[in-house]
Amino acid sequence: MTKPEKKYQPFQFKQFAVDHNLCSMKVGVDGTLLGAWADTRDCKNILDVGTGSGLIALMMAQKNEEAEIHAIEIEENAFKQARINFDNSPWSNRLNLHFGDFKNWNTEEKFDLIISNPPYFTASLKSEKEGRNLARHDDSLPLFELLNKAKEILSDTGRICIVYPFDGLKSIEEQTKICALYIKSITLLKPIVHKPPKRILVEITKITSFEVMMNELSIQANGHDFTHDYIQLTKDFYLNF
């Protein structure tokens, strides 16, 4: 007997809610941290690649009241979910949703910020659900193709911000060189202060930088209490901060 689909309650943030029942990938820490961390200052055009439920695009709209926000999604159910969340948000007039494959997307726009929580699994066991595979595995959007396409539509002073596994840092360094892009800053994300990093937040530009700015951010101090830095970074979004 097939198990019934689990129903998820909308995730309530301070200024918006994210319904993620249709999405294979639910609201999580990776996307929220990336959205909170990315610098949106002086950005007129922002693009969220692989928007899923629309979480990061919504965060961009909250952070920058002047920017036009675009989001692209390849998976049909996630696209439908993002449309619902955008329409129900306070910024529906500034949120533009596109359906399709980012690699083949034709646009005349140039973006000051391109942000993505990309699929990054390369050799792990796949799910029976195609939507989940699109969201998690990089077959549909390898890192090189993400960066190469992003460079093509990035403004001269624009930035690319992504969240990625810590053990993929070498791959990011290699692929940015191939694409003639440059890493500007890296934040190492630790789940707990005394644990090794699990994720990285990376800012990439077209402009060469002689020194990469690197720092660390721990989510929890002891497995229970959130760190001061994590609270400060996400307090504009999470209800309990």
Image: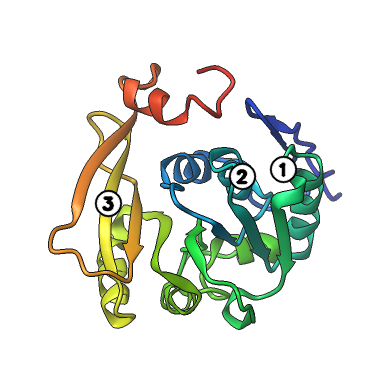
User: 10 Å neighbourhood of mark 1: few (<14), some, or many (≥20)?
Assistant: some
Q: Nearer the viewer, mark 2 or mark 3?
A: 2
Q: CA distance from mark 1 to mark 2?
A: 7 Å
Task: State how many labels appear.
Answer: 3
Q: Quadrant of residue 135?
A: bottom right
Q: Which residue is mark 1?
A: 91
- Determine the secondary structure under disc 2: helix
Q: Is residue 22 above or below residue 109?
A: above
Q: Amino acid at mark 3?
A: Ile
Left or right of residue 12, residue 234 in this image: left
- Residue 34 visible (yes or no): yes
Q: Residue 190 in the image: state x and y as whole percent.
A: 31, 37
Residue beneath the point at 80% across and 40% down: 88
Q: CA distance from mark 2 to mark 3?
A: 23 Å
Left or right of residue 185, residue 19 in this image: right
- Determine the secondary structure under disc 1: loop
Q: Residue 193 in the image: state x and y as whole percent.
A: 26, 28
Q: Quadrant of residue 232?
A: top left
Left or right of residue 47, residue 161 in this image: left
Q: Amino acid at mark 2?
A: Ala
Disc with the residue nearer the chain's start (2 vs 3): 2
CB under 8 Å between callouts 1 and 3? no
Q: Which residue is mark 3?
A: 186
User: 10 Å neighbourhood of mark 3: few (<14), some, or many (≥20)?
Assistant: many
Q: Is residue 121 above or below residue 186?
A: below
Disc with the residue nearer the chain's start (1 vs 2): 2
Q: Nearer the viewer, mark 1 or mark 3?
A: 1
Residue beneath the point at 34% across and 57% down: 203
Q: Residue 69 in the image: state x and y as whole percent.
A: 63, 55
CB under 8 Å between callouts 2 and 3? no
Residue beneath the point at 63% across and 29% down: 13
Residue 61's disc number: 2
